[in-house]
Image (cartoon, rainbow, N blue to C red):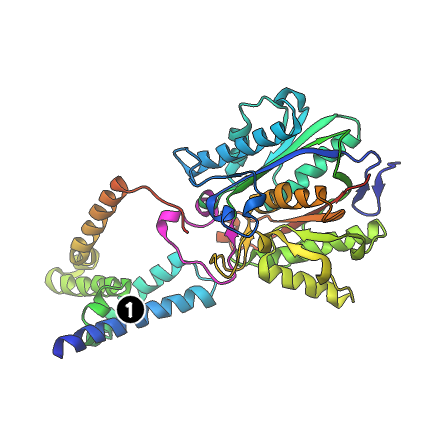
Amino acid sequence: METFWEYAKAFLTGGLICALGQILVDKTKLTPARILTGYVVAGVILGAVGLYEPVKKWAGAGATVPIIGFGNLLAQGVRKAVGESGLLGAFTGAFTAAAGGICAAVFFSSVVALIFKPKEKK
Amino acid sequence: MSLKHVGKQSVQLTAPPSFIGYASAVGRKEGEGPLGSAFDYVSDDMLFGQKTWEKGESEMVRRALELALGKANKQPEDIEYLFGGDLLNQCIGTTFGIRSFGIPFFGVYGACSTMAESLSLAAMMIDGGFADTAAAVTSSHFCSSERQYRFPVEYGGQRTPTAQWTVTGSGAAILAHEGPGPFITRITAGKIIDAGIKDANNMGAAMAPAAYDTLRTHFSDLALNPSDYDLIITGDLGQVGSEILLDFFLRDGVNLAPNYNDCGLMIFSRETQDVHSGGSGCGCSASVLNGYILDGMRSGRWNNVLFAATGALLSPTSTQQKESIPSICCAVAISNTK
């Protein structure tokens, strides 16, 4: 039962974040790219003021996997690095914390681009 | 004093040129649509056997022109002028597609109104005595247009409810001084109309005022009524734009609905093909005209058709710079009698 709730909470939170994105696509003139970067910036801000941490605790992967979680990770990384190495950390912290995700994204996109050819939408 | 120019922006041709051959080549989705059987060539392969979408689009253009020449029983060297264009930067869809033909060429950019503009110029060239035989060709391709105007297909972007689906299709028409018909009898050139719409995902709404302006001018210049035509067909206003156009005419007390249709609404089934507001693109009106409509005229289903193709003259840069969308509509009257 414990596991079920863990999944349910992750699904609910992740789903809400995606549903909000769909509403933005349908009801505003924002392009998908702007919505994407908007989410990253929102994650940075929510992370910086400490509002994202409780959501993450409650929803787990439902809050960390969507792109807003990436913004939160950047903010966390900066906070940690500033604590350890001062002002320089403001410049190095974000990408140190996100290095795993960014490298994985670059690596897997390259592999996928090599293996697959683009196809039309049906 | 011109003998043929009538009113503000219309032309009454004195020796109406005839369609002597026409053809359309389309992609699979168009082939699966309600008009599928009217197209001369349906490709299962969106690349048309080529390596890129753009090369595929050019191959589709080449094929449409080749088929039209065959149906007209003409060789490329018999064609004195070719008018055409497409949606890609520098109109490469057309120029690369026709480069093997060796036909004297004038490039036309009218966005999705290109077929009507090209036909107008070819018809006036013949009526003016500058040529005996001239051709018009245009194309659009869903995947190359997505790259040109929005995002490459591999990005997988979401589409909004008012967005239209760019038709993968090409249409080619061969006109001649003498022929069995149908004939191009009247032309109304369009002005740039900008109603201030800024949403590049709602081009039907941006183009509807241009269609209204050109159609209204056509009727007043030539002292005609909508009822003088069996079919008035716009290019790619889609669901949203068509409703706006009918509304504009209703405000003038004119009910256009009984003999009105839109190529963008005809080419796809909006219920089963997930195309949101309908089809769009140069290839939309071009393939519907050079397949379904002209076939219908030759079979006697319609005798007088007003073909009013609409174009949204935006670019990705103008959209990014938050410009509104200027639009144009060119009307070509096609009749079974001279």
Number of marks in the rendered image: 1
Report which quarter residue B15 is drawn in: top right
Front-most of A33 and B117? Answer: B117
Specify the subunit that label 1 lies on: A
Q: Residue furthest front?
A: B299
Report which quarter residue A53 is drawn in: bottom left
Horizontal and vertical percent position of residue B152: 40, 46
Picture residue at 74% right of the left edge, 66% below the top:
B250
- Report the magenta residues as a range: B144-166
Does the segment drawn in magenta span residue B227? no
Report which quarter residue B4 is drawn in: top right
Does the segment drawn in magenta span residue B161? yes
Residue linked to disc 1:
A45
Q: Quadrant of the C terminus of chain B?
A: top right
Left or right: residue B219 compared with residue B169 = right
Left or right: residue A63 compared with residue B196 = left
Front-most of B68 and A3? Answer: B68
| Mark 1 Cα shell of 10 Å, populated few (<14), some (14-19), many (≥20) | some
Q: Quadrant of the N terminus of chain B?
A: top right
Identify residue type, mark 1.
Answer: Ile
